[in-house]
Image (spheres, rainbow, N blue to C red):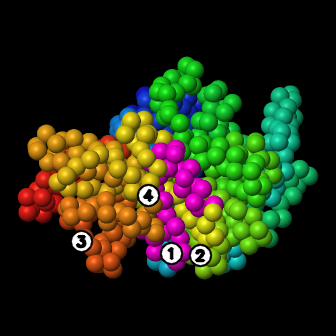
Amino acid sequence: MDLSRISTPEALKQLSSAELNDLCAALRERIITTVSENGGHLASNLGTVELTVALLRAFDIPRDQIVFDVGHQCYTYKLLTGREADFATLRQFGGLSGFPNRGESEADLFTTGHASNAISLATGLIRARQLTGQPGSAIAVLGDGALTGGMSYEALNDAGSSGLPLIVILNDNGMSISSNVGALSRYLTNMRVSKGWIGTKKAVAGGLKRLPLIGGALFSFFEGFKDHIRNIFVHDKFFTSLGFRYLGPIDGHDIPAMEKIFRRAVALREPTLIHVVTQKGHGYAPAENSPDIFHGVPPFYVDSGEYKEETGPEFGRTAAEYLIEQQKRRGDICVVTAAMKDGTGFSVFEEACPGRLFDVGIAEEHAVSMAAGLARGGQRPVCAIYNTFLQRGYDQLLMDVCLQKLPVLFLLDRSGLSGPDGASHHGIFGLSYLTTMPGMRVYCPINAAQLREAMDEALAYDGPAAICYPRRLPMYPALRTAEVKPCARLREGGDAVLLCAGMIAKRGLEAAELLEKQGISLAVFAVSQIRPLDQGVWQDIGTRPCFTLEENVLSGGFGEALCAEAARTGHKAPLACFALPDAFPAHGSRHCLLRQAGLDADTLAEKIQRSLNGGRA
């Protein structure tokens, strides 16, 4: 089927059942082909093709407003809301975002990327409609993984107790990224009743239709009576106790069934939760068999599912392996993660140290405070969390860890620019808030040796510490072999000094090579201990002009902290601080994003030269 003819919800509503099957096959093929070239979220999007088609047929966009939780299941939605022609640019610099994005279409209500907020956003939308008298529905679409986040329950409690005509569609595929954990996951598993209700409903309905003469009448009776039959299999108390009418579970790959129940939910005009059961990776065998591996993937070969490029070792896996050694020696180390034991590389720790890794689901606030409790109980907890997601635990970090002066170590994976995942996933604010927290030590190692040194220091420190690192260890020789010092010299130079926080030091070295050709000798240092700043850095700088470089926003970052330290100690402040602008970078390759921010080697060399010649950097 030619998707260019079906790129709007209006065209979608004209299709027959047979055409809908062809459409879903074409959508899956397009998603698989594009993600195989660009990388992206595959399994989650393949699992929601029919669900999205049913949504766009049952509701009227933009009058009805759909909010996707996280948004990593929005590819079909993009293809069917006017963006089919640009879909090949998915996750590319200047192209379509891999998440909902307000700048792309009026069909995208919010620019999203973090979990558990869709019900709150939709609650606000439906209240705004009530205040202005506008018609239409507000629909929150979330995976069962998002229900491991406490914010979802705050919103369910509010919307349910208020009687708002809010529609919540729970896409139950048994996973977020890693397999879901906790009591609610077990509850939904029971609600799902495996092949029970859904399978029985299909079998009975199909059998009745085949009966001669009386089959049609019996089928009609069954259709009207099946809600009572469902109660034999499904007994919901949880959602109804929160004030929601529960409908389901229904097959999330059955478009007519979903359309019917969606329209019924609109007619009810009360808080309604629709439980839809889908298969993550549906329609592509490698993703069906390994939905965790195919949640977020780099470019891959469609036939085999194998990645097109070899990936180097990861910081997180290296940290996990080192902690395994430390746990065997110490006996008091445990790890807390928020639905990211695979993404952070800590599955190996769970295997090697059974019972000492706690995956709390998508609940960073709980993860941080629970880690504080572990520390207060005499353990040495390590929180392995993506840099961008720790932001959700800010208050707990400040109040439950720092205020209590507890020895919790935070390993912040994906620090710096995240690349194609875009604005919601860039870990570029961590240095700014971590360095303001009393007692917090902050490190930015550039290789495995510095990582281990930082972890040793953090585990010996009787207080909180954070280690920020990108996903992969460096392949660049000068970074791999850098000395283990708080301020490691990467390159000699007599004319000026560039102090780099973390892995962006590679760009600093490249800029120094360009400046060398112009007769300027730039020394480059990698500062791995950001706070407290090693006072030996002033001796390393000496009398030479100094610059700073970091992959963090300028406000409150390493450069500004160094300026404040210079003012406090009477040293000469840096001539210029090179950092990301105080904005939300778009999506694209790291190289493109650094160039856009003026942090590529050519631009850095030009700015340093201009500054040394008396101009503005």
SS state under label 3: loop
In this picture, is 45 found above or below 547? above
Secondary structure beneath dot 4 equals loop
* Residue at far top of view: 303
Q: Quadrant of residue 294?
A: top right
- Marks 3 and 1 sit apart, C-alpha to C-alpha, by 25 Å
Which label's residue is closer to the chain start, 1 or 2?
2
Give the mark, 4 or 3, whose residue is nearer the N terminus: 4
Residue 437: within the magenta? Answer: yes
Residue 515, compared with residue 216, is above or below; it is below
Callout 3: 10 Å neighbours few (<14), some, many (20+)?
Answer: some
Residue 402's tag is 2
Mark 4 — residue?
486
What label does residue 437 carry, if any? 1
Q: From where the camera sits, is residue 59 visible?
A: no
- Quadrant showing the C terminus: bottom left
State the residue at coordinates (55%, 19%): 303
For the residues labelled 2 and 3, say whether their Cβ atoms are less than 8 Å apart.
Answer: no
